[in-house]
Image: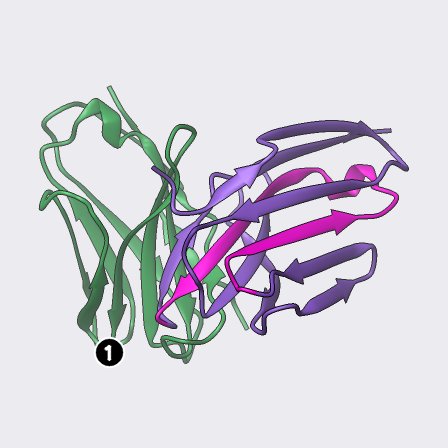
Amino acid sequence: TQLLEQSPQFLSIQEGENLTVYCNSSSVFSSLQWYRQEPGEGPVLLVTVVTGGEVKKLKRLTFQFGDARKDSSLHITAAQPGDTGLYLCAGVYNFNKFYFGSGTKLNVKP
Amino acid sequence: KAGVTQTPRYLIKTRGQQVTLSCSPISGHRSVSWYQQTPGQGLQFLFEYFSETQRNKGNFPGRFSGRQFSNSRSEMNVSTLELGDSALYLCASSQSRQETQYFGPGTRLLVL
């Protein structure tokens, strides 16, 4: 059983569409991170959210941490082919234990 | 600054053999964590080393072990390989245990 459930598992959309990826848990995390991983590479950190209710924006990406610090979402506006990749959320427990979600594989078609 | 490097990048072994993977962290980083990534289980934490001491361990059998050297380089060893050990093994380093992790490109292990 995954501590962090990500949905959807797969997403294939056209360039210009919007999308949201969800990361849910029954546990409370001290912080939550979002990564993007491309084939043949390790995950690259996109953002860390720490405070319940926090919203962070990174260009066309908007990250939100739930009020209870148990869930998070990643919203991409006007997706581009360069956004294609595996998106992973990671809950940080007790400040030094990382639990990763199973990932959302995003494919943006031109 | 050079990123996290992992060697080898690809490895093919047979069941019953053992394997050692190496990770060189970013200069100045003292914490090194190892993860196993498979399509079925996703990214799972193996263990974390900080200043040559194992600080955290995930739920993996004793066949998986690791160590860290005084220069912060780390090795991971898997003995008596099983088919299910086929995976991408990722190493991540950080300055301290609570800082941002930077991942290497991984070692892809195939067990036949």
Colouring convention used in this rendered image of the protein: by chain
Foreground pick, B69 / B66: B66
Q: Picture coordinates of residue A77 (x, y %)?
A: 85, 47
Q: Chain letter for purple, please.
A: A
Inspect the image, locate mark 1, and give the three-letter code of the amino acid beneath it.
Answer: Ser
Under circle 1, the secondary element is: loop
Looking at the rendered image, the quarter that the N terminus of chain B falls into is bottom right
Q: Residue at x 33, y 72 (%)?
A: B31
In the image: residue B93, left or right of residue A12: left
Q: Picture coordinates of residue B91 (x, y %)?
A: 37, 55
Q: Residue at x 52, y 62 (%)?
A: A32
A6 in magenta = no
Looking at the rendered image, the quarter that the C terminus of chain B falls into is top left
- Image position of B41 with respect to B45: above or below: above
Q: Chain letter for green, please.
A: B
Label 1, on which residue? Answer: B51
Query: What chain does badge 1 belong to?
Result: B
In the image: residue A82, left or right of residue B101: right
Query: Which of the 4 image quarters holds residue B39?
Result: top left
How many numbered marks does the figure carry?
A: 1
Q: Picture coordinates of residue A104 (x, y %)?
A: 59, 37
Q: Picture coordinates of residue A73 (x, y %)?
A: 65, 51
Q: Residue at x 32, y 54 (%)?
A: B34
A72 in magenta = yes
Residue span colored magenta: A68-94
Q: Residue at x 23, y 64 (%)?
A: B56
**Residue A105 in sight in this render:** yes
Extreme-top residue of the structure: B112
**Residue B109 in sight in this render:** no
- Image position of A19 with respect to B27: above or below: above
Foreground pick, A79 / A69: A69
Foreground pick, B42 / B33: B42
